[in-house]
Image (cartoon, coloured by chain):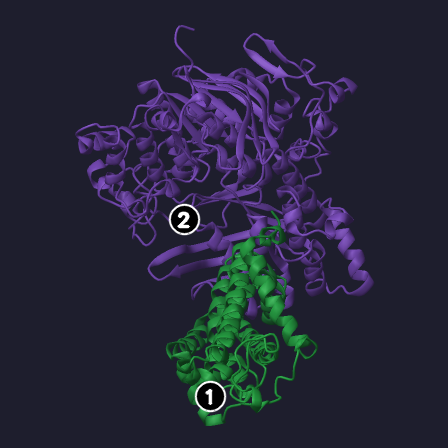
């Protein structure tokens, strides 16, 4: 290599309060290269980024190794020189753009500051040029507004513009798209890719999303429990992983169009070792199917095959785990008997229409995937169905064909227990003051009518159903891992033997290996209890795996509903087409303009302002009638035969 | 770090020791007083501090050291009782307004604002003039004035908790409002309540002393500190500073001690 690496980390170890977090990590990012660092939560990937910049929080300490940036020894710099490095050579973009921007200063002033601290003149012109460069449509208007007036995606563009103002040698992106919608994420990643090619900036991209990182990066490193277990060219790591952990992690993903009828997802047994646990041997050995006594006794060397490194004693292939074998595909054939029906449900808050005239039917035992980006009204629709919010006059909710009250108070006990929910975030959904036995025991008492000895028995059985042990019952939520907490939340939803369970992004807060186990559990429970699911998610791979039918919502309106394969493969609504295409760079369909804000009135088709296939003024009129009870209705002016399907895209 | 470890700071430990000292005086004063705090000795009136009378004597020759120790009991029964009563009422009121929302919240919140708008000491004086001064009335009046302040803290903590999903989860499993407020929400908002209670206790001590000084609080011949200051402050100009100084110091030390404890708790739990 004729130039210095943009970043070179050698044998880096970091401790927090004497607890080792990162152990002897070595990696290098060449000039202009994109390096992806992936791993599940708690593996130390953010720590690695902060350590590389020498910007660890107070409790963190670098205990060994070296870091050099563009040939400069970062660990040897004086405080002042370090600040100079931060100011001129390296930039960092964090997960939440709304916290990276100062809410009291206009976007323009913040961006101009990034130039003026470097002593550049014409800060205003440069700032406007930079905003244009990050593809913000009207830079001069955006210069004068405050951050909260912009959408999350545009905010992240501004942050990236600020980061690139100094033309850094290295750009560190820490989960830059985690809080953003799929179509916005795709645009941001495209942008980073384009800027990298143009400016030649090296990028260190940190994420939990292995496929996304593989698409973006030249090379990937995989962290596990503070150790770099695998490193190599992106395509090789993704398609022929050499470490059993990477291999298992990839097989946990419900990708490749897998359906639940084809069998359960792979999981990784056990848990991440607690941070600071002594690790003399292979860190993954306790969870590895391939592990032999050698693995438990001796740390594996970093073995190279070409440019592909793996810290494992053995070479692939690795044996598939027993649960990868497809289970007998005894998928419940969903009946045609509707258990829950929404009829013209609307909900307005002042001038904002959160849900607009949504009608749909849910058959007993089926899974309806509910898809849509933030602001689509899917969570509000869930609250209406649950009775947590009352729908506007004129709408009705039918349970087994009989209308139920608009609020919980107006419903009977049987009606209340029939519809339950699994919330997105178990930390919020489980009362931290109470033990698991209380959290699960109360619904058994209130909804199922258990008491005394019978209650104890039912409690143990309920816990067993989600693979929780008796020891867990005596714990409080804080003592449980994210996956175990979500199991408690699932058990609670099932305590009263519901007919319908609404799953509101139940795995979006969880790691991939845990997500697979939770999805398997949900499928198993549905088989056993014959319950119908409304599965809300933004992850189309998960929805494809789980759902029998899919409904697509946009700004409170139902755009399309139909059998899962038909909706995802098309012909489908132009908005669905954009959602489906967002995960692949080659065929990505871009939406036009910014998503309209809440309260904005749109005449005619709700999607016309962003529709990439708007055919003309006809789109400003109401689309043809839409029968929500038909097999696969699509709310669009374009004739069905002309609507795109996935197969058309590929040819 | 665990909350208990976070409490091990010099400020909190100092405050805790001061408060503990006065609590011991209040509980076991009878064994600690060298002399009878009520016994007059006109021959030894206004004696300066000496080996026989460590803090000197007052106008009718009562031993001031013994009276200071005995004075811990009245203030440390009225102030905590008032704070306790205010905590009970304020917590209930705050939970109801915060959880119910809507018109109940609007009505009770306005009522709370009205009471908060009135100066504490003026309200207390008016009520005590109407009801007549007594320890019980002082307790009730301070509780009345502190209830809305505690209710306000509890209300805002309750509103924050209601945004968490465990509250709708409880509604969905058919729990009543009382269960949700007192079994689900209350345990989670105990830390801010505890901090508020300690801060209030400091103010309650201060208020009891003020009311006694003004003659509307604890009545003679109690060795209450505020009362002692009121009975003797005219003597300061005569050079008999010890008759007032030690009572003032005792009051100040107790208020400072309680506030140090409050600060330590706020840092550990707030």
Whole-percent x, y for residue B26 in the image: 63, 76
> Which residue is drawn at the image coordinates 32% and 54% (left, top)?
A599
Q: Nearer the viewer, residue A56 or A227?
A: A56
Q: Is residue A478 above or below residue A24?
A: below
Which quadrant of the rendered structure holds the N terminus of chain A?
A: top left
> Which residue is drawn at the image coordinates 56% and 58% (left, top)?
B12
Residue A411, visible in the rendered structure: yes
Whole-percent x, y for residue A280 in the image: 70, 23
- Chain B shade in the render: green
Residue B215 numbered mark, or none = 1
Residue A209, visible in the rendered structure: no
The residue indicated by pointer 2 is A375
Mark 2 belongs to chain: A
Secondary structure, mark 2, is: loop
Whole-percent x, y for residue A521 in the image: 68, 42
Which of label 1 and label 2 is nearer to you?
1
Which quadrant of the rendered structure holds the C terminus of chain A?
A: top left
Question: Which chain is represented by purple in the image?
Answer: A
Residue at the extreme right of the image, as rendered: A453
Mark 1 belongs to chain: B
Describe residue B153's horizontal placement relative to residue A484 as left or right: left
């Amino acid at each position: 290599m004729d130039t210095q690496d943009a970043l070179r980390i050698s044998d880096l170890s970091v401790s927090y309060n004497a607890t080792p977090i990162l152990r002897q990590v070595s990696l290098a990012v060449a000039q202009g290269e994109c390096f992806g660092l992936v791993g599940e939560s708690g593996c130390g990937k953010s720590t690695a980024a902060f350590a590389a910049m020498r910007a660890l929080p107070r409790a963190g300490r670098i205990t060994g190794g070296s870091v050099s940036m563009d040939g400069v020894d970062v660990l040897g710099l004086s405080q002042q020189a370090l600040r100079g490095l931060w100011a001129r050579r390296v930039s960092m973009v964090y997960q939440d753009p709304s916290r990276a921007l100062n809410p009291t200063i206009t976007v323009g002033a913040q961006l101009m500051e990034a130039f003026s601290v470097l002593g550049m003149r014409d800060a205003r012109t440069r700032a406007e040029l930079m905003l244009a460069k990050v593809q913000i449509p009207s830079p001069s208007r955006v210069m004068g507004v405050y951050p909260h007036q912009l959408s999350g995606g545009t905010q992240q563009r501004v942050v990236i513009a600020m980061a690139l103002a100094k033309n850094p040698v290295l750009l560190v992106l820490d989960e830059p798209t985690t809080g953003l919608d799929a179509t916005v994420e795709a645009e941001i990643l495209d942008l980073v890719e384009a800027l990298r090619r143009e400016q030649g900036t090296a990028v260190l991209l940190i994420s939990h999303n292995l496929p996304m990182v593989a698409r973006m990066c030249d090379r990937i490193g995989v962290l596990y429990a503070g150790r770099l277990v695998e490193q190599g060219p992106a395509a090789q790591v993704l398609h022929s992983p050499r470490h059993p952990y990477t291999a298992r992690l990839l097989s946990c993903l419900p990708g490749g169009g897998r359906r639940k009828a084809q069998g359960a997802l792979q999981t990784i047994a056990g848990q991440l070792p607690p941070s600071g646990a002594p690790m003399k041997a292979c860190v993954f050995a306790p969870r590895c199917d391939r592990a032999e006594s050698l693995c438990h006794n001796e740390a594996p060397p970093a073995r190279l095959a070409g440019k592909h490194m793996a810290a494992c004693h053995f070479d692939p292939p690795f044996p598939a785990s027993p649960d990868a074998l497809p289970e007998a595909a005894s998928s419940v054939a969903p009946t045609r008997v509707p258990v829950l029906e929404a009829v013209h449900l609307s909900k307005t808050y002042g001038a904002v229409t959160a849900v607009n005239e949504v009608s749909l039917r849910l058959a007993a035992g089926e899974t309806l995937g509910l898809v849509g980006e933030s602001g689509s009204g899917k969570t509000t629709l869930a609250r209406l169905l649950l009775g947590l919010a009352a729908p506007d006059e004129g709408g009705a909710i039918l349970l087994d064909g009989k209308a139920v009250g608009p609020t919980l108070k107006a419903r009977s006990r049987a009606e209340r227990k029939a519809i339950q929910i699994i919330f997105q975030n178990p930390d919020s959904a489980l009362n931290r003051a109470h033990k698991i036995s209380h959290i699960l025991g109360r619904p058994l008492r209130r909804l199922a009518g258990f008491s005394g000895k019978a209650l104890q028995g039912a409690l143990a059985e309920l816990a067993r159903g989600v693979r929780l042990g008796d020891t867990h019952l005596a714990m409080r939520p804080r003592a449980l891992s994210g996956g175990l907490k979500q199991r408690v939340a699932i058990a609670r939803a099932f305590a009263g033997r519901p007919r319908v369970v609404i799953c509101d992004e139940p795995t979006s807060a969880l790691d991939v290996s845990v997500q697979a186990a939770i999805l398997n559990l949900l499928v198993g429970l549905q088989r056993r209890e014959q319950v119908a699911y409304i599965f809300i998610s933004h992850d189309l791979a998960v929805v494809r795996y789980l759902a029998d039918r899919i409904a697509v919502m946009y700004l409170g309106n139902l755009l399309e509903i139909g059998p899962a394969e038909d909706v995802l493969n098309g012909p489908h609504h132009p908005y669905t087409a954009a959602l489906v295409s967002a995960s692949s760079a080659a065929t990505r369909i871009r939406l036009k303009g910014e998503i309209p804000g809440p309260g904005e009135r749109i005449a005619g088709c709700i999607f016309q302002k962003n529709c990439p296939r708007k055919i003309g003024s006809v789109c400003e009129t109401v689309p043809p009638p839409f029968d929500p009870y038909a097999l696969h209705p699509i709310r669009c002016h374009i004739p069905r035969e002309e609507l795109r399907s996935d197969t058309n895209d590929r040819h | 770090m665990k909350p208990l470890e976070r409490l091990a700071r010099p400020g909190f430990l100092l405050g805790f020791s001061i408060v503990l000292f006065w609590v011991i005086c209040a509980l076991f004063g009878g064994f600690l007083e060298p002399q009878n705090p009520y016994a007059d000795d006109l021959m030894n009136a206004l004696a300066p501090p000496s080996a026989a009378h460590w803090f000197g004597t007052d106008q009718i020759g009562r031993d001031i050291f013994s009276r200071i120790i005995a004075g811990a009991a009245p203030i440390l029964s009225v102030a905590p009782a008032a704070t306790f009563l205010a905590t009970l009422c304020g917590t209930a009121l705050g939970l109801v307004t915060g959880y119910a929302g809507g018109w109940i919240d609007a009505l009770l919140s306005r009522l709370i604002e009205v009471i908060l708008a009135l100066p504490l000491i003026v309200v207390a004086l008016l009520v005590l003039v109407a009801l007549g001064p007594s320890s019980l009335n002082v307790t009730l009046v301070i509780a009345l004035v502190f209830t809305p302040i505690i209710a306000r803290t509890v209300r805002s903590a309750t509103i924050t908790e209601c945004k968490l999903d465990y509250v709708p989860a409880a509604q969905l499993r058919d729990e009543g409002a009382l269960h949700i407020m007192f079994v689900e929400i209350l345990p989670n908002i105990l830390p801010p309540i505890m901090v508020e209670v300690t801060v209030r206790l400091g103010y309650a001590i201060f208020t009891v002393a003020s009311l006694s000084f003004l003659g509307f609080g604890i009545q003679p011949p109690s060795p209450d500190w505020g009362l002692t200051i009121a009975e003797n402050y005219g003597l300061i100009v005569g050079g008999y500073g010890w008759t007032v100084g030690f009572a003032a110091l005792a009051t100040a030390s107790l208020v400072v001690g309680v506030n140090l404890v409050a600060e330590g708790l706020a840092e550990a739990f707030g």
